[in-house]
Image: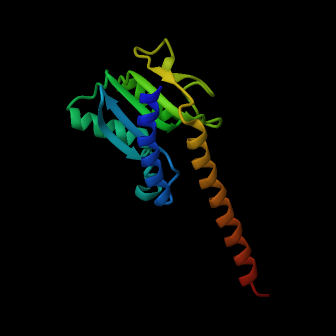
Amino acid sequence: MERDEYYMKLAIEEAKKAGEMQEVPIGAVIVIGDEVISRAHNLRETEQRSVAHAELLAIDEACRSLGTWRLENATLYVTLEPCPMCAGAIVLSRVERVVYGASDPKGGCAGTLMNLLQEERFNHQAEVVSGVLDEECGAMLSEFFRELRRKKRKAKENMGKNTSC
C-alpha cells in the first residue's frame, strides 16, 4: 500500500497542475516496475478535446515511450475513477492494474456504476484497487467544483447589477 500511496501522490501532483490551469484536477501516472513511464493531467478545456483525459494522455505517452500499444505490465494510478471512455482504453491497451483515489458516482466504470475493467466478456481484465488517498483526491475535486460554482454565482450576480432598464 505504501507503494500505491507514493505513486498516487505523483498523480495528485499532476492533478494539481490541471487545477492551476482551471482544468478539472485529475492526474494520472503509469508505472512499470519502479519506473514512471508517463505522467499526465486533464487538458480537455485547454485543448478543447473531449478525449484529453488524464488517463488517455498518459496511455498515449506510455505507448509512444515504449514503442508498443500493449501496456501489459503497467499500473495506472489516477486520482478519479475512470470513466467509460478511459476504462475502454485501459482494457484495450492491456494495462495490468488500475489504482484510483476518489470514486465517481456519476461516471465511474471501475466499480461504482459498473466495472468495465473486470468485465469477463472482454479479452482483458485489469486488477482494480480503489480508495488510495481517496480523501485527498476527493477534497481536491470538491474544492475545484465549489470554487467554480462560486465564480458562476458571482458572475451571474454581476450580470444582474449591470443590466439597466
Q: Where is residue 27 in the image (x, y as percent from the top left)?
A: 45, 44
Q: Where is residue 50 in the image (x, y as percent from the top left)?
A: 46, 47
In which quarter of the view is residue 137 placed? top right
Q: Is 65 drawn above or below residue 91 in the view shown?
A: below
Q: Is 139 drawn above or below residue 37 in the view shown?
A: below
User: Seen from this angle, which residue lies furthest right?
Assistant: 165
Q: Where is residue 99 in the image (x, y as percent from the top left)?
A: 47, 29
- Is 90 left, or right, of 101 in this rendering? left
Q: Which residue is drawn at 50% across and 17% down?
A: 118
Q: Which residue is drawn at 31% across and 26% down?
A: 71
Figure quadrant of the C terminus: bottom right
Q: Residue at x 43, y 48 (%)?
A: 13
What sort of colour scheme is used for the picture? rainbow
Can residue 35 be seen at all in this image of the molecule?
yes
User: Seen from this angle, which residue lies furthest left?
Assistant: 67
Compare residues 159 and 77 and report the one nearer the observer.
77
User: Seen from this angle, which residue lies furthest front?
Assistant: 2
Q: Is 29 drawn above or below residue 146 in the view shown?
A: above
User: Seen from this angle, which residue lies furthest bottom?
Assistant: 165
Number of marks drawn: 0
Compare residues 7 and 52 and report the one nearer the observer.
7
Q: Where is residue 53 in the image (x, y as percent from the top left)?
A: 44, 44
Q: Which residue is drawn at 42% across and 48% down?
A: 14
Can residue 81 be seen at all in this image of the molecule?
no
Compare residues 71 and 47 and report the one nearer the observer.
71
- Is 17 left, or right, of 59 in this rendering? right
